Amino acid sequence: MNKSSGNKGSGKGAGRSREDRLKAALKANLARRKMQARARTANPGDDGVRNRNKAGD
C-alpha cells in the first residue's frame, strides 16, 4: 500500500498555499528591508553614537 496515494490531490493545493505564504513572506521581508535602507540613507551619520555620548554628559 502506498501512503501518499491518498494525498496526491491535496498535495498540489497544499503546495500552492505554501508557495503563496512564501511569496507573501518574501514580499513583506523585502518591504521591511527597503524601509530600513531608506531610514539609513535619511540619517547617514546617525549610528547611535550620539545617543550614547549624551548619557555621559
Image (cartoon, grey):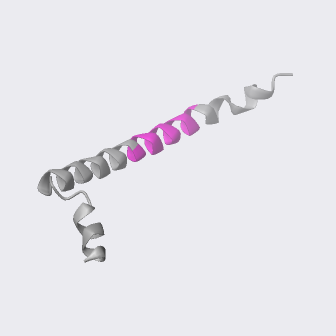
Q: Look at 31% across and 44% down and name the residue there.
A: 30
Q: Position of residue 34 (x, y in %)?
A: 24, 48
On-image quarter of the C terminus = bottom left
Decide whether residue 45 is among the magenta residues.
no
20 relative position to 11: left or right: left
Left or right: where does residue 17 sit relative to residue 31? right
Q: Looking at the picture, tell me which residue is in the foreground, 29 or 40.
A: 40
Q: Nearer the viewer, residue 27 or 20?
A: 27
Where is 46 relative to 3, above or below? below
Numbered circles on residues, count: 0
* 1 w.r.t. 56: above or below: above
Q: Residue furthest right?
A: 1
**In the image, residue 21 lies in the stretch drawn in magenta:** yes
Main SS category, magenta section: helix
| Image-quadrant location for residue 2 | top right
| Residue at 63% in and 36% down | 10
Front position in the image: 39 or 47: 47
**Residue 11 spot, x, y in % from top left:** 61, 32
Q: Position of residue 22 (x, y in %)?
A: 45, 41
Residue shown at 24%/53% (left/top)?
35
Q: Which residues are magenta?
A: 12-25
Place residue 53 in its image quadrant. bottom left
Q: Is residue 35 left or right of residue 21?
A: left
**Residue for point 66% across, 28% down:** 8
